[in-house]
Image (cartoon, rainbow, N blue to C red):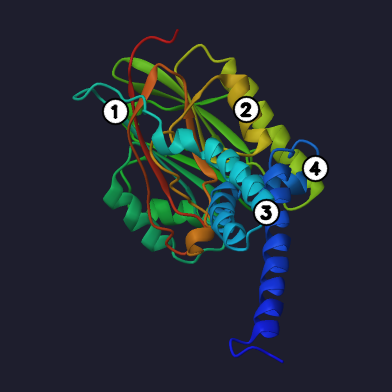
Amino acid sequence: MTSSDGGPAVSTLTRVAGTVVLALGGGALFLTVAGFLGRLWWVFDLVANFRPQMFLVTVVLVGAAALARQFQLTGALGVAAALNLITLWPFLTGIPLTPPGGEPTLEILSFNVGVSNPQRGDVMAFIAEEDPDLVILLESSFEWEAAASAAGLPMRMVSVVPPTFVSGITVMARPELGASLLGAEFTPVEGVGVRVGLDGRFVDVLAIHPPSPTSAGRADRRDLVLAEAGVWAAGRSLPTIVVGDFNATPWSHAYRSMRRETGFADSLEGRGLQPTWRAGAGPLMIPIDHALHTDDIGVASRRTGPSIGSAHRALIVEFGFVGERG
């Protein structure tokens, strides 16, 4: 006989639920570990970019495994959740290095505008309203530069997209910064170095945009550009900033290698996650637009702006001096 509470049916449902939790838990454990092995395979490094989402998934699955009385899985998922949280912890709880109040600052607006984005006029209106000191347009083009000229922004173009390229990096600066180009061994699509003046001192700024890691070859090139950017930045004798669309999150192996090479501070630490891509994806968004800096520079403010037709949100960071470089 079948009990009135549906005994066999309930038992079957419980077994199915347990199997589902086991499968999902095993997958979450695998992805958590794989994210730390990005150096071995570019696909694993893609997984690492979604570390915040993995943390939330593992936390939910800890509860599900506990309810299913799968206690070994519960413990393993608890360890996975802790590992994911450890990687996020500096960005959630760190103490940002900030410059003294009242001192001159350098506001940089970095924006991957998207070469085919038709909302050029709206982007220029946003830049005019924001009124930064230095503007870096990634995936820029002749059309974007024409739109900037037509907008009458109080800036001069320091770097433009070469005639032989469909897109590249455009850098605009306020004339009083006295910005000048610096030599850098990158294609104009991937990197542009400039030197600007601030309060009687100079700052070197490297704008970068390595390829998106959508294949093994592109991932290798992304890693190479980030490595070269690290070597370039580590070799500067002046206060230095590296900014742009890195096509990597802080949990990517290439990004972490670059941080080790330079010893630079991450302007994101202590300020939350501030995801920039893909705009409109809600909880699936990740931070791939960054600004790193030497320890003689502090961050007065850091925030993201609107996307205005782009797949990225703009990044606006305000820097200031905090002392001599050690």
* Towards the viewer: 311 or 263: 263
* x 31%, y 28%: residue: 176
Can the viewer see residue 42?
yes
Q: Is residue 163 above or below residue 69?
A: above
Indicate the position of residue 148 as horizontal and vertical percent values: 41, 52
Q: Quadrant of the C terminus?
A: top left
* Towards the viewer: 88 or 241: 88
Which quarter of the picture shows residue 192? top right
Question: Which of pointers 1 and 2 lies earlier in the amino acid sequence?
Answer: 1
Q: Between label 3 and label 2, give the one nearer the viewer.
A: 3
Question: Which of pointers 1 and 3 lies earlier in the amino acid sequence?
Answer: 3
Residue under pointer 1: 105
Is residue 58 toward the left or the right of residue 313 in the image? right
Q: Between label 1 and label 3, give the one nearer the viewer.
A: 3
Q: Are marks 3 and 2 in contact (CB under 8 Å)?
A: no
| Picture disc at residue 28 | 3
| Mark 1: secondary structure | loop
Q: Between label 4 and label 1, give the one nearer the viewer.
A: 4
Amino acid type, callout 3:
Ala
Q: Between label 1 and label 2, give the one nearer the viewer.
A: 2
Indicate the position of residue 100 as horizontal and vertical percent values: 24, 21
Rounded to the nearest whole Å, what is the CA distance between mark 4 and mark 1?
A: 41 Å
Q: Is residue 240 above or below residue 318?
A: above
* Towards the viewer: 104 or 82: 82
| Picture disc at residue 286 | none
Question: Which of pointers 3 and 2 lies earlier in the amino acid sequence?
Answer: 3
Q: Quadrant of the N terminus?
A: bottom right
Residue under pointer 2: 258
Residue under pointer 4: 41
